[in-house]
Image (cartoon, grey):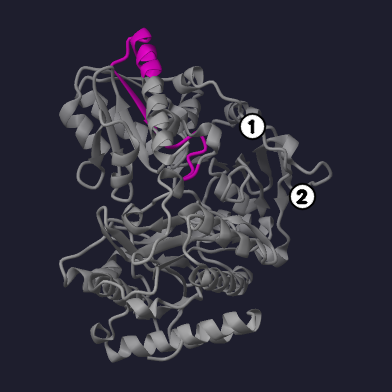
Amino acid sequence: MGWIDICEKKKMNMSNNLEKLKKEISLKKIDFYVISTYDENLLEYTPNQNKRLQWLTNFTGSNGIALISNKKKFFFTDGRYILQAKKEIDSKFKIIDLQSENFFSFLQHNIKHKRILIDYRNFNIKFIKELKRIAELNSIKVYHEKKNIIDKIWHRKVKKGEKYCFFLKKTISGENTFSKKKRIFNKTNYDFLILTSSESICWLMNLRGFDLEHTPIVFCRAIVTKTFIKLFIDLNKLPSKKKVKGVQTLSLAEFESEILKLPKNKKLALDSSSSYFYYELMKSAGLKPDLIEDPCINIRCQKNKVEINHSIKYHILDGVSLVKFFYWLEKTKLSFHLDEINVSKKLEDFRKENKNYFSSSFPTISAFGKNASVIHYNPIQNNKRLISGQLFLCDSGAQYLGATTDVTRTIFIGDSKPKKEYISNYTRVLKGHINLAMIKFPKGTRGHQIDSLARYSLWQNGLDYSHGTGHGVGSFLGVHEGPQSISKNLNKCELKEGMVLSNEPGYYKSDCYGIRIENLLLIIPSRYKGFLEFKNLTLYPYEKELIDLDLLTDVEKKWINRYHLDVYNKLKKYLKQNEKSWLFKKTQHF
C-alpha cells in the first residue's frame, strides 16, 4: 500500500470516527464537545492508547484542541503545527492559529447559550476555570464527562506496561529524595503537598520507568509532607523488594480516596497545573487547597554538578553518533531505500551503540525538501526519498542514563552547488544561533529579553519563524522542561546558573524547505561579576557548504572556528580513521 493510499485510509477512518462522535453528541443533547491532545497525566506526550484526539481527527502533533458540534468543527493549534494540521485533518475543520486567536477569545465571541461537554480529567485547573468564566458570561452550560465518550466509541486494547520502574543511584541523580524534599519545604509553608505531575514526582523520588516511549517516567501521583511521602503507582511495576525510607506505596486507584482523607484543619497545596478533576474533588469534600506552582520545577530546572557532568559526558557520545551518521549519509549512494524513515532509523542505530543509551528523547524529525517546512514533521506522514539538490533537516535526541540530548542540523544533499537562497537563509539562521550562544547577560534576565538576538539577522531580511527559540531540557527526563524558555512570549522565570536550554532558530518557506540549527546550552557564571553566559553542550559542526562567509562578521567566524576545534578535539578519539579525517575537513578553520 502506497503512502497516498495510507493517507486516504486514515481520512476515511477519521470521517467514520467523527460520525460516531456526532451520534453520541446527539444522544447526550450536547451542542459542543471539547477535546485536546492531553490525557489524564497532562504531559506533553501521551501513550498511544490515550491519543484520543489523534484517533478522532488524525492530528499527530502535541498541541491541539478541537471544538466539535454536529454542524461545526474548529481546531486550534500553534504556529509549529498549522501546516501539519492542514495536511492531516478533515477539510471541514476550520483551523485557527492560537497565536492569532486563543481558544477562549474565540469562545467568548462566537459561542453563546450552548451546552458544552468536557472531561475535567484531561484539562488543567487554569483551563477549566477560564472556561467556566466565559461560560458564565455567555450563558453556556459546562458539563463534566464522567465516562469519556472517546473511550466508549474507540474500541482498542489498552496495553499494560510489563517493565519494572527503577530508582537512580545518587551517582546519577546527584541528590537523594530526602534532600530534595527538604529543599522543597524550605520554600513552602504547607502541611500537605498534592503532586500530580509524573515528571516532578519521578525527579523527587529519583524514579524512572517505561510508561512513555521517549520520556523515562512511570505514571504516578504523590501526597508529600515533611515526614512522609505517599507514592501512588501501578504496584505491578515496582520491584518487589524495593522499599524507600519514609515512602508508602499505594496503587494509583487509591489516590482519590486518600485525597478525601486529608484533614480540613491543615494547610494544603495543590499543584496549579493539576487536572481540574482533582481540584473539584477536593472542593466537593470541603477541602480548601491553595493553588501553587509545582514546587519541584524551580529546583529541578537547575542541574546539580553530577547532572551537569553526565550531560557533558553523554553529549560527547551523542556527537560521535552524529558524526558516524552524517558521514554514513554523505558516503551512501542515493537510492530508493534512502528515505526519511530509513535514515532516522540509521541514526538511532548509531546512538544505540553508545553505553547507557536508553531511548530516543522524542520522535525524530527527519525531513527532506518541502517536508522540512512543516516545523514538527513526522516522516510517517509522507515518507520522502532523499534526492540530490535539496536540504535535509534532522532534529533528534536521546535519553541516556543520566542525560537528555536534543540537536538539529540542516545539510545539503548531493554534489551540486546549493541555491543562493539556501545559503543566504542558512547563514542568517546561523548568525542568530551564534548571537544567542555568545551573549553575556546580567542575573535576573528572562528568556523573552534575549529572544530577538536569535531573530535579528532574519528580521533584517524580512524573515522570521513561528516557534520559540529555546526550551528547557530535563536531566534524563522530559526533553521539553519548564519553567525556563527563550521566546517572544513573556516568561517570569529568570535564567539561572545550571539551567539547560536549547538554542534553535530556524526559517521555513512553506511547501519548499526548512532550516533549523539547534544546540543545547548550559548556563554558567561569566567572568564579569553579576553576569551569566552560555556553554555549548552539543558537539557537531555546522554545514560549511551552506555558509556565506561574506555575511559573517570576524567575531562570528572566530566563534565558529573555536567551536569546530572543540568539536574535533573532543570527538576524534572515538572515531575510526576515515570518520576522523572526514570530521577534520568539516571543522577546518575558515
Q: Is 40 contained in the magenta span?
A: yes
Residue 361, visible in the rendered structure: no
User: Label 2 neighbourhood size at 10 Å, few (<14), some (14-19), many (20+)?
Assistant: few
Q: Callout 1: helix, strand or loop?
A: loop
Which residue: 33% across, 76% down? 546
Q: Residue 65's spot in the image, x, y percent?
A: 34, 35
Q: Give the residue at mark 1.
A: 159
Q: Disc 1 and disc 2: Cα gap in Å?
A: 31 Å
Span shown in magenta:
19-45
Q: Residue furthest right?
A: 241
Q: Residue at x 51, y 70 (%)?
A: 326
Image height of 54 relative to 527, above or below: above
Q: Quadrant of residue 54?
A: top left
Question: Is residue 283 one of those drawn in magenta?
Answer: no
Q: Is residue 152 above or below residue 259?
A: above
- Please name whichever residue, 151 or 273, is drawn nearer the observer in this view of the structure: 151
Tell how many labels: 2
Does 29 sit left or right of 313 as displayed? left
Secondary structure at badge 2 equals loop
Q: Residue 374 or 272: which is nearer the viewer? A: 374
Indicate the amino acid at tag 2.
Lys
Mark 1, other Cα within 10 Å: few <14 / some 14–19 / many ≥20: few
x then y, percent, for residue 351: 61, 63
Q: Is 262 positioned to the left or the right of 540 in the image?
A: right
Q: Dot 2 corresponds to which residue?
A: 245
Amino acid type at image mark 1: Lys
The residue depicted at 72 percent of the width and 38 percent of the height is 162
Q: Nearer the viewer, residue 453 or 573?
A: 573
Q: Is residue 104 left or right of residue 446?
A: left
The quarter of the picture where the C terminus appears is bottom left
Q: Residue at x 73, y 61 (%)?
A: 169
Label placed on residue 478: none
